[in-house]
Each structure stands twice: as C-alpha cells, then as structure tokens.
Image (cartoon, rainbow, N blue to C red):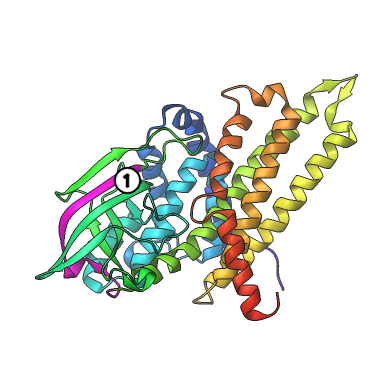
Amino acid sequence: MILELSPAQAAFRTSIDAFATTVVAPRAAAIDESGEFPADVIMAAAEHGLLGVTIAKTWGGLGLDYLSYAVAIEAVARASATVAASLVVHNSLVTELLAHAGRARQKDLWLRRLASGGAIGAFALSEPAAGTDAANQKTKAARIAGGYHLTGRKVWVANADRASVAIVFACTRPGLRGQGVTAFLVPMEAAGITRTARADSLGVRGLGCMDLDFDLTVTDDQVLGSVDQGFRAAMWALQGGRIAIAAQALGIGEAAIAEAIAFAKTRQAFGQPIADYQAIQWMLADAATELEAARMLTWKAADAKDRQERITTEASMAKLAASEAAHKAADRAMQILASAGYRRGSVVERLFRDVRATEIYQGTSEAQRMIIAAGVLAAGRV
C-alpha cells in the first residue's frame, strides 16, 4: 500500500497550489465581501483545466484521475472555499454526470464547452421540501407530444447566476419517489425559467446561488440518461461530489490551522510565544491529526472512485470525517487567535463561516451517518 501521491499527481498539485496562491487567494476576501459570483476567477481556473479535471482529453478535459481532482480542489479551497465549491458543482455534479450518462448528441452539444470553460453548469435537485429527502421531488415533468412540460421550483442552485446549462430533476411518475424521477439538460437561456437571487448566506458567499422557477417545454432529446432513472443518476453524481466536498473541507481546515500556527509563533504572552504553551500545542496537534486522518479517507474514496461503480459508503465516510475535522480545526484556530480571529474581516472569521457549509450541502452529516450505518449493517463489517 502506497499512501503518497505519484510524481505526476504531486506535480499537478504543485501547479494548482501556485495558481491558487497567485490568482485565487488575492480575490478571496473581495469575493466574500461582495457576494458576487467570481466569473473571472472561474475562467482563470478553466485555463488550468479545472473545469474538466477528470474528463477525457477528447472532450476538452485533462483526463486525470479522481485523486488528482481531489488534491486540486483542496488546493483551491485553501485559498477560497467559494471558488472550490463552484468547481465541485461544475465538475462532479454536472460535467462528470454528463460524461457518464449523456448521449453522443448531448455530449457534442455541451461536454466540450463545459470541460474547457466555454460554459458553466448548475445542478438543480434541491427543493423547499426536498433537501435530505431528495427523492421527494415536487417539480413535475408532464408527458406531452415529443417531450415534457416542466413546472416547479428549485432552491439553492449553485452557479445558477452564470450557468449556461442546468441538470434539472423532476418527477415523471408521481407517487414512486426515487423510481419516478427523470433528469433533463436545460439551457438556462430558455424561455420559461425565472431566476431569483437567494438571501445572503453565512459563508461560501459568491457561489451564484439562485432559486429557479420552471414553466417550459423540454424535448425527449433533453432527457439525460434514462426516463425515471434520474434519481439514481443524481446519487451517482453525489458520490463524486461528496469526495470533492471532503477535499474542500480539508483545504479550509488546513488554511485555518496555518493561520493559527503563524499567529501562535508571533503572539507573545507572559514573555514567550503562545506556541510554547502546551494548551496551544495540543489544539494544533489534535487538529493536524484529525485532518490527516480525514485526508486518508478522502484519498481512499478518490482512489476507489476510479475503480468502482459504487462508492457510497467510502464517499460518505470521507465527507463526514473531513467536514467535521475541518470544523474543529477552524474552531480551534478561532480560539487560538481569540479577538484577532473573532473580528469581522479576519481570514479565520471567513474560514469559520465557510467551513460550516461543508457539513450541510451535498448531504448533511446526519445523512452521511445514515448512509454509513446502512452500508455497515448490510456488509456486516467495517
């Protein structure tokens, strides 16, 4: 067992580290302050292949493995949780799902544009009554000649502010929950889509979240995958998404601890740096250990993603461990910096707000525990 990156993976991480440090980090505070979608940074990310990391080169992507993708997201998240989250939605939930389930014509129309940065994707699954209970879709797709009439409301649709296309999930067989949901590729310029800006969020500000109201006709050619199999497609995409959110959380946690370490080495109390005190050292030691353990789960899940069709338990373990370890790391960093971290506008204050979302979106920690428990009970072992 080799628990380290290959030379190629390490080189890719180094290149993305440099991009994140020179391009993303200088914009992070302004993105958070304004709450505006950072289209310029996303386009700069596209120039580094970050809008199609795992997509085959023939479709305009980098054709890299999932571990390379995970370490890239972690690197970006150290600089900006918002930019990382936008890339996760675009890659894991849209571009990869299109590559996995799309028909040739759909790929010709959208995949190369998405992978190369010519288009941004959104994933419209959540509804007012369909968050953790994602099978409870109230958006309806009623069958008509040649297609469907799509009506309903989606909420918290990330990237929707600038997206060119959205994958929209709708009920096609009422009463069957997840067995009667279909996914559709919907151009965001289509008539019959109303975008409403979301109320301001605590963290990960600038993610371009919108509520979307639909009242339009879609054709049979816009069905992504098979009719009534959309929920299964969504769950497939969320496996990858949860690994990527785990990587995002690791980046946020690592950034928080880096701030705490720098502060502890320079802040003097009672005639010496506070880093010399055991209380501070133990907080740093616990945070570093928990983040590294979560990183191993994340790398394990990322490696499994390239080799297995189903990685439900591995992805949930990674997301649960990484998001909660990162939350603790940000909390400890806030404690170490004290008033210097608690002030509005400090880096740790932003990270403290950002990290909380990783325990909520793409499946809450409670949902991850339910999934893990179901997997363990079914297997009869860990």
Residue that appears at 36% across and 37% down: 198
Find the residue positioned furthest to the left. 145
Residue drawn at x 39%, y 48% is: 47
Q: Residue at x 32, y 56 (%)?
A: 114
Of 10 and 230, nearer the camera is: 230
Q: How many marks?
A: 1
| Image position of 124 with respect to 299: above or below | above
| Vertical order, 287 against 221 (above or below) | above
Tell me: 76 left or right of 337.
left
In percent of width and height, residue 99 lies at 35, 68
User: Magenta stretch: residue 257 in it?
Assistant: no
Which is more toward the observer, 221 or 6?
A: 221
| Image quadrant containing the N terminus | bottom right
Residue 190 seen from this side: yes
Instruction: Look at the image and tell me whether residue 11 can be seen.
Output: no
Residue under label 1, please give it.
160
Magenta stretch, main secondary structure class: strand
**Which secondary structure, mark 1?**
loop
Quadrant, the C terminus: bottom right
Image: 174 above or below 17: below
Is 216 within the magenta? yes
Judged left or right of residue 27, residue 318 is right
Locate residue 294, reporting x and y percent.
Answer: 68, 57
Give the image location of residue 80, x and y in percent: 52, 39
The amino acid marked with disc number 1 is: Ala
**Residue 289 vs residue 107, the one in the foreground:** 289
Q: Quadrant of residue 379?
A: bottom right
Reply above or below: 8 against 129: below
What's the magenta region? Answer: 210-227
Residue 308 falls left or right of residue 153: right
